[in-house]
Image (cartoon, rainbow, N blue to C red):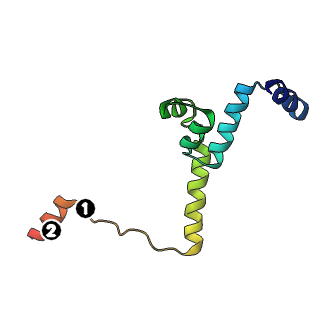
């Protein structure tokens, strides 16, 4: 199967990609579409530890995460959503001082 993967990728892209690199590419593409989706990558790649997956892939999808974040904010803005939490005016100590006045 490894030779078939290599031959197909070479035929389509002209690149020499090993099966191990193919796994990395798949993980990168998945994380670009699903930032933070390490558990799925861990299971698909057969890593025993979450630490292994995050050590290799954490941060690889940072740009994609920013794009997803921006898209969500833009959706909220275009929908006119105002369901945002009220901003607290100071912490508990500030509130106690105000109440004591």
* Quadrant into which the N terminus falls: top right
Give the number of marks: 2
Tell me the element at label 1.
loop
- Front-lying residue, 49 or 31: 49
Q: Dot 2: few (<14), some (14–19), or many (≥20) neighbours within 10 Å?
A: few
Question: Looking at the image, which residue sits at the far right?
Answer: 11
Is 66 positioned to the left or the right of 93 in the image?
A: right
Image quadrant where residue 9 sits: top right
Position of 2 relative to 101 (above/below)? above
Q: Which residue is located at x 57 percent, y 48 percent?
A: 65
The percent position of residue 53, horizontal first and vertical second, equals: 54, 33
Image quadrant where residue 12 sits: top right
Q: Which residue is located at x 58 percent, y 47 percent?
A: 35
Q: Separation of disc 1 and disc 2 at Cα? A: 10 Å
Tell me the element at label 2.
helix
Q: Which mark is residue 65?
A: none
Q: Which residue is located at x 56 percent, y 69 percent?
A: 77
- Front-lying residue, 55 or 79: 55
* Quadrant into which the C terminus falls: bottom left
Residue ID for mark 1: 90
Position of 82 relative to 49 (above/below)? below
The percent position of residue 58, horizontal first and vertical second, equals: 54, 36
Which of the two discs, 1 and 2, labels the residue nearer the N terminus?
1
The percent position of residue 70, horizontal first and vertical second, equals: 58, 57
Asked if residue 14 can be seen in this view, the reply is no
Residue ID for mark 2: 98
Position of 82 relative to 90 (above/below)? below
Q: Are marks 1 and 2 in contact (CB under 8 Å)?
A: yes
């Amino acid at each position: 199967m490894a030779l078939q993967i290599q031959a197909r990728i070479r035929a389509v892209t002209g690149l020499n990609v090993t099966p191990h690199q193919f796994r990395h590419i798949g993980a990168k593409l998945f994380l670009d579409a699903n930032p933070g989706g390490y558990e799925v990558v861990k299971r698909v790649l057969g890593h025993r530890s979450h630490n292994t997956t995050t050590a290799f892939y954490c941060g690889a999808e940072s740009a994609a995460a920013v794009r997803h974040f921006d898209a969500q904010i833009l959706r909220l803005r275009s929908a006119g959503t105002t369901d945002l939490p009220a901003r607290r005016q100071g912490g508990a100590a500030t509130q106690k001082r105000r109440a004591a006045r």
